[in-house]
Image (cartoon, helix red, strand yellow):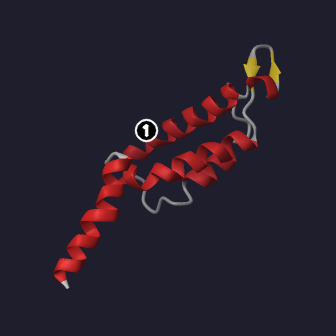
Amino acid sequence: MKIPDYQKVNEMFFKKIKVSKPRHQRDVGKVLSLIKAFALLNVWFRKAEDGVVYANERDIEEAFKLWNAIYESQEYNLPPYIFDLLKEVIIPAYTEKGS
């Protein structure tokens, strides 16, 4: 697997990050794995030379759509469903009771 447009991946990943943390090294690996997974799911429509499949721009965009859906919960080290519970139930109940 090759990702030829690594500059775009770098730019899109660090767009949301203000201060780098050690956990972001793991997160970059997860994003790269998502890009490769999208390329493999569409392997018949991707450029391939000598057994190497090349991810394209659409694979990168789709991977970041998925990553952006879980990014915020990953920053707090919570599963997405727990983070949604916090945002939709616990915080509104707390602010209602507090005011």
Residue at horizontal 42%, vertical 56%? 72
Q: Residue at x 68, y 49 (%)?
A: 8
Q: Residue at x 67, y 27 (%)?
A: 41
Residue found at the far left of this picture: 98
Q: Is residue 35 above or below residue 71?
A: above
- Does the image show residue 76? no
SS label for mark 1:
helix
Using residue 6 as the reference point, say whether residue 18 is left or right of it.
left
Q: Quadrant of the C terminus?
A: bottom left
The picture places residue 42, in percent across and down from the top left corner, at: 73, 28
Q: Position of residue 55 (x, y in %)?
A: 72, 33
Residue at far bottom of view: 99
> Measuring 57% from the left and 35% from the top, which residue is drawn there?
34
User: Whole-percent x and y of residue 94?
Assistant: 21, 72
Labels in figure, total: 1
Quadrant, the N terminus: top right
Q: Residues within 10 Å of mark 1 (few under 14, many from 20)?
A: few
| Quarter where residue 56 is shown | top right
Observer-nearest of 21 and 27? 27
Horizontal relation, residue 70 to residue 92: left or right: right
Where on the picture, by quarter, is residue 54? top right
Closest to the observer: 20 or 31? 31
Q: Nearer the viewer, residue 49 or 93?
A: 93
Find disc 1 in the rendering and name its residue: 26
Residue 36: percent from left, percent from top = 63, 30
Amino acid beneath label 1:
Arg
Can residue 38 be spotted in the picture?
yes
Left-right relation of 72 to 95? right
